[in-house]
Structures are given as C-alpha cells and as structure tokens.
Image (tube, rainbow, N blue to C red):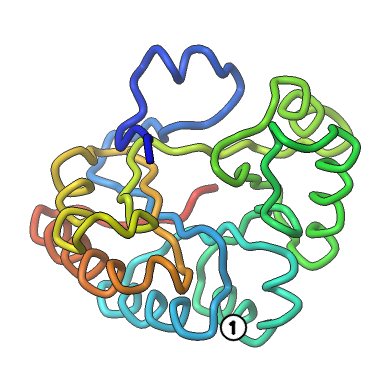
C-alpha cells in the first residue's frame, strides 16, 4: 500500500482551493478523525480528547450517522466539529460526478457542516470546484500528516511516531475512528496527545 505520510508542498500546489494546513501563530494542531461514528472507536477517541481538553474535527459517513446517531450527538455536545465524508465512503475517481455529488447531498441531510473531506483524498478537480462554488460552498479539507493508523502493516508506535515526527504548528492530522484503525489508535492517539501537550501545544477543531 503506497501513501504519503506527509503531503509535499508541490502536491498541495496542484490542488488549488483545498485546505491542507491552517496558518497559525501559536502552537496549535488540528486533529481529525475519518469514517465514524463507530460504536467502540469514537467513544474511545472522545474520552482521550476530554482528558487533554482537546477539540477535534470528525469527518463522518452519513450511513454511520444514521446507525449511531447518539454517538454523533455526543461528538457535537462535547464541543467538536463535524464534516461531510459522503454517505457511503465513495471514491470520487471511481464514480460519476452526479453519483458522487448526490451521495454528498444525502450525507448532508444528517451532517450539518460546511466542511468536506473526500474519502481516500480522491476527488476530481471538477467535483472539488462544484462543492466549493455556490450554492454548496464547502471548504474541502485535506491534511498535512497521515498517522497511517489504517495500515495494518504498521505498529501503533510507528503511527504515533509518524505524527510526532512530522506535525508542526497548523498541521491538519488524520486519524480514523474505525474498527480497522482501533488497534493502532488505542496507543498512537494518547501518545500524540501527551507528547504535544508537553510541548505546549493545544488542539483545536477546524473552523
């Protein structure tokens, strides 16, 4: 499985209009969690965030919001932000534009947000331009650092180290609140929260 743990500047330049990091003047990190809500992983994440008074952004799949509505409400009640991650985790490169946009609209019925993240980070320039234009006006949120927690070949320690080594003020960091990622998330997320808290960072949600 090939993927880039840190997005290089030249790749970010190719995709104009997408948000890869947040300009800051303080020690702030933007943790984000994809693919939830999940009945085991999401409550674990929320518990860890609460320990560090951390805010995060959860990019949710519409069908999971339907299935775990109470957990979705808990995310909001605890002060975090949510974003649209499509209704069925669609790859924008592999479906027709109409299908992709309709799937996002279906998710928007239960996810009230102007933030959108494409599953797998894959969407066409046309899809991106439509989402960012009137009347939708989504902010397309990508990332600067991947923890790699979805990669079952990695250890939990390696996932945490990916973030600790590469994140910097303003970085958008991706974890996953999913069954697949949970074995690595259990160790990597607390390690990241502890490390950066000790370095004087705070964790905020994407606005």
Relative to 131, 156 lies left or right: left
Considering every residue shown, the one lying at the far left of the view is: 198
Q: Secondary structure at mark 1?
A: helix
Total labels drawn:
1
- In which quarter of the view is residue 133 placed? top right
Relative to 106, 141 lies left or right: left
Relative to 203, 46 lies left or right: right
Q: Quadrant of the N terminus?
A: top left
Residue 77 lies, with reference to residue 90, above or below; the image says below
Locate residue 66, reporting x and y percent: 76, 77
Residue sitting at x 40%, y 12%: 10
- In which quarter of the view is residue 154 placed? bottom left
Locate residue 101, reporting x and y percent: 84, 41
Residue sitting at x 39%, y 57%: 150
Locate residue 80, reporting x and y percent: 51, 67
Relative to 129, 74 lies left or right: left
Residue that mark 1 sits on: 71
Residue sitting at x 53%, y 85%: 39
Residue sitting at x 20%, y 63%: 156
Locate residue 142, reporting x and y percent: 51, 37
Residue 29 lies, with reference to residue 122, above or below; the image says below
For this rendering, which residue is in front, 126 or 152? 152
Q: Residues within 10 Å of mark 1 (few under 14, many from 20)?
A: many
């Amino acid at each position: 499985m090939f993927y880039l743990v840190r997005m290089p500047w030249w790749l970010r330049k190719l995709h104009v209009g997408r948000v890869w990091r947040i300009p800051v003047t303080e020690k702030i990190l933007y943790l984000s969690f994809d693919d939830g809500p999940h009945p085991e992983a999401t409550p674990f994440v929320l518990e860890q965030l609460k320990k560090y008074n951390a805010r995060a952004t959860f990019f949710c799949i519409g069908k999971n919001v339907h299935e775990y509505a109470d957990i979705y409400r808990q995310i909001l009640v605890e002060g975090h932000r949510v974003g649209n991650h499509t209704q069925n985790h669609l790859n924008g490169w592999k479906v027709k534009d109409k299908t992709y946009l309709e799937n996002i609209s279906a998710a928007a019925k239960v996810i009230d947000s102007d933030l959108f993240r494409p599953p797998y980070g894959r969407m066409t320039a046309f899809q991106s331009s439509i989402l960012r234009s009137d009347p939708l006006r989504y902010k397309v949120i990508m990332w600067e650092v991947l923890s790699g927690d979805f990669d079952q070949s990695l250890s939990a320690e390696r996932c945490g180290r990916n973030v600790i080594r590469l994140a910097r003020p303003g970085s958008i960091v991706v974890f996953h609140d999913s069954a697949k990622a949970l074995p690595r998330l259990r160790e990597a997320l607390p390690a990241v929260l502890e490390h950066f808290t000790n370095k004087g960072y705070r964790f905020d949600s994407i606005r």
